[in-house]
Amino acid sequence: MRRVLGVLVTLMLLVPLTAPGAGAQGAPIRIGVPVPLSGGNAKMGDDIAKAATLAAEEANAKGGLLGRKVEIMSFDDACDAQQSVTAAHKLLDAGVVAVAGGYCSSAAIPASAVYHDAGVAFVADASSNPKLTDQGFENVFRVIGRDDQQGPYAAGFMMKTLKAKRIAIIHDNTLYAKGLADATNAALTGRAGVQVVFFDAVTPGEKDFSAVLTKVKSLKPDVTYYTGYYPEGGLIAKQFKDLGVSGKFMAGDANNDPTFVSEAGNASEGVFVTSTPLPQDQATAKAFIDRYKKRWNQDPGPYSALEYDAVNVVLNAIKQSGSADRAAIVKAIAATKMYRGATGAISFDKKGDRTSVLYITYIIKDGKFVPYGVS
Amino acid sequence: MQIALQQLVNGLTVGAFYALIALGYTMVYGIIRLINFAHGDIYAVGAFLGLSVYGLLAFFRVGDPVLATLVALVVSMGCTGLLGVLLYRVAYRPLLRARLSILISAIGGSLTLEYGLFLVYSPSFLVYPHLFGRAGLTAGDIQISWLQILIFASSIVLMAALYLMVHRTKIGMAMRALAINQDAARLMGVDVSRVIALTFFLGSVLAAFAGVLTGLYYSQISFLMGFLIGLKAFTAAVLGGIGNIPGAVLGGFLLGILESLAAGYFSSRWKDVVAFAILIVILVVRPRGLLGERVVERM
């Protein structure tokens, strides 16, 4: 039912987009941006699309690329496997030369096969499931880290900094959350004195998690790590405190959002969140944040800077290769070396993963995400 | 033992929400044999209207949380009740004799409300003010907040009031008469359309009550919040025997407790599978639900 509506919404969005762009010398260079614009993750999608638009507008203000204007085409993938494939086909039909975007791994992975078949470069901004680049597609890249990089980092933080012995892990069965949970579990298994006492999933979209937390409580954990997304994360953090579960509450990078704090209220104080650094905690992103605020009159979302970089990596590749040919772009992106983006220097390894990804832990203090310790 | 009791408390809280919403499904089905798919979204509208009232009261500096909550409940329940009547007038009354079309109309109503909220309010999650802390009763390891007690007690009171109204008042008699035979009721001088409208009003009022309490208790609301819980509440209504008021209440609490126990003693991931498997077994044994769809006098 909702899927049908999603398609309708997409169709409605399509109308203004397919109207011919006026005033461009030659056809514009079109970059595809698939993001969730409906459903629970619509806000993230909106933040990402705005960052992409900003990148394109800046390129156009400098005279465009190869004498042509850059145009962003944004379609709704609703974080849904089927709809992301539909969106991918629509983008290809619209003649995009490369794709930079996506949010949920469960939507990005099926779509990546479509882009692969068409030979179009796909630079993911926020999809961190290892599978995305493990498929062996030469056209797929990502500017965010992989869950199997965040998992060991989170495990190390629990063991070394928090000195945790009994650890509970909760995910939500989505590809991203399960991937991060598995990677964390694997990094903890076999460590002397450390025990994963609980490993189970909750259902996204529900509001009451007291039953599962009551079970966790009976296992007396030192740390409970939630690897799902913030809408449930805030509720779980609140109910965790309400039920008086022992130990610390810790959450994965999809909880790095102010809504997490407003949902959990006081219960969010002292919660740890593992994440790539927020833009405002990176010196390289200062200029981007100022421009984003000026353009959109709001703060950038947690993935805005990554999307800004993803689009710019594509634009940079077009500039370097001097061609808007799909295959040439793929080649030029793979050759990207130390591109200076808002999230730091960007290079890709053979798989298309970004080399040298930084993770940090935030602690929530007075309702703010404060860096706890950089590693 | 303490854990089992805590799980029971958890289940009763969720169950109270299921029961309040299930009543709306069951009353409408009892009277016009319609599965009102939009009912879950009516509940969502109630939650959003409540949030607006809180916002307005904060603007006028009404600081007292109890007073603010009372106003939010009354305004939201009243407005949502009228919305339920409007939905009936616009989407259902012209189609009362077209069984399939009215079902599609119900789905249309559901989507209209969902995406109406999306457009009027916000695509992202909204958060209620944290008015009531987690204070409450503690017995050993068992935690019960005052809010939980309030939710449970007030829903029981409302359900009892509804039951008494249906069985002890003249208008209740008219509702029951309608459930048995519409034409006969009309011949006896019952204003059929008005009584049906009243049924929608009452169901929507209860849903709005549940919506505002959801916001207060869980703090988070979103335009799709009615989808999943609507499905569950409908299930609860069928479990208890659709068209049957005590059945909806029993079904709601039972489903809440089943889910809670399944998550606590089996696995949270398998919670729905376990709870719904038990449900299928119950329905196979008792196809008309636990308390039965009373043929002669359905409510």
Image (cartoon, grey):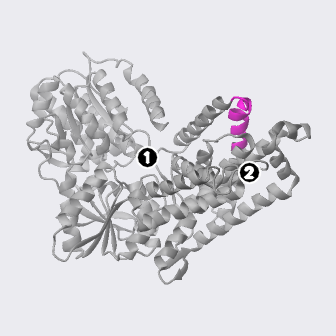
Q: Position of residue A259 (x, y in %)?
A: 42, 56
Task: Tell me the distance, in whole angstroms, between the alpha carbons under discs 2 and 1.
Answer: 40 Å
Q: Residues within 10 Å of mark 2 (few under 14, many from 20)?
A: some
Residue A260 left/right relative to B218: left
Q: Is residue A266 magenta?
A: no
Q: Looking at the image, which residue is at 61% across and 71% down?
A: B149
Q: Position of residue A362 (x, y in %)?
A: 28, 64
The tag on residue A40 is 1
Q: Is residue B176 above or below residue A193?
A: above
User: Is residue B216 at all visible to an observer of this figure?
Assistant: no
- Amino acid beneath label 1: Gly
Q: Residues within 10 Å of mark 1 (few under 14, many from 20)?
A: many
Residue at disc 1, secondary structure: loop
Q: Which residue is mark 2?
A: B294
Residue B4 left/right relative to B75: left
Q: Quadrant of residue A214?
A: bottom left
Q: Position of residue B254 (x, y in %)?
A: 58, 62
Q: Nearer the viewer, residue A139 or A300?
A: A139
**In this picture, which residue range is highlighted in magenta?**
B84-98
